[in-house]
Image: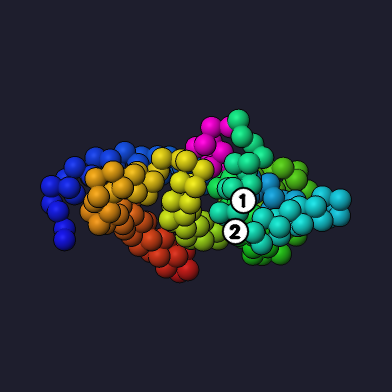
Amino acid sequence: MWDGEAARAALPVVLDGFRVTLLATVLGFAAAAVLGLVLALGLRSRARLIALPVRAATGFVRSTPLLVQLFAAWVLVPGLDALTLGVLVLGVHYATYLAEVYRAGIDAVPKGQWEACTALSLPRRRVWRAVVLPQAVRNVLPPLGNYAVSMFKETPLLSVITVQEMVHEANTYGSTHFAYLESFTLAAAVFLLASWPTSVLVRRLEVRLAR
């Protein structure tokens, strides 16, 4: 049966965990966004010595569960802070997916744009900075938003390497005070309240960019 007093006592604990969850999501997605672009450029490289290892590495990461990667990193890098390690694993894991998103966005730039840049003899760096990347970013914003929401919802997996994120804190409070119903319900509510508006904004962005 629901205990209102237990819920009120659990709320500050859950919100403290939410701050860690939010921090891990923001830092992890920032790392994924940067690394994903680097991997996308590697995948598009004409040099086989670059493209083949990048393709093999991204395929391996995408083919293994995030939970397994967290355990492996926890064992192989024992001296690193748990939150830092979790952020790095999240960043690398999602970077492999964002790389394909970036690559699709770059490939979607009309061929005529590339030909016009060649005809104008624009420097390669300026072509990417002023022509290709602005159009590619416009194409990939909606899927990037979806992956950000997905990462946010997968942060509870960080609890397996002792990161004190929201679900970890809810579980700890529930086991200590025998209030699992209240603590986990509050955690679920916070997840919903945080992710639902973002999902709505992403859908609206998709509609706007499709016009």
Mark 2: which secondary structure? loop
Q: Quadrant of the N terminus?
A: bottom left
Give the left or right position of residue 208, taking residue 172 as reference: right
| Image spot of residue 191 (x, y percent) | 33, 54
Residue 151 placed where, x, y %?
48, 53
Where are the magenta residues, as a range?
A: 80-88
Task: Report the quarter where the C terminus lies.
Answer: bottom left
Question: Which sits in the foreground, 151 or 76?
Answer: 76
* Residue identified by numbered label 2: 65
Q: Quadrant of residue 13?
A: top left
Tag 2: Cα neighbours inside 10 Å, few (<14), some, or many (≥20)? few
Residue 107 is situated, as x and y percent measured from the top left of the image, at: 68, 62
Residue 56's tag is none
Q: Relative to residue 207, is residue 194 drawn left or right?
A: left
Q: Is residue 127 above or below residue 77?
A: below
Query: Tag 2: residue type?
Result: Pro
**Residue positioned 19% across, 42% down in the render:** 9
Q: Callout 1, which amino acid?
A: Gln
Residue 161 appearing in the image: yes
Task: Read off the residue under disc 1.
Answer: 69
Marks 1 and 2 sit apart, C-alpha to C-alpha, by 6 Å
Confirm whether residue 138 shows in the render: no
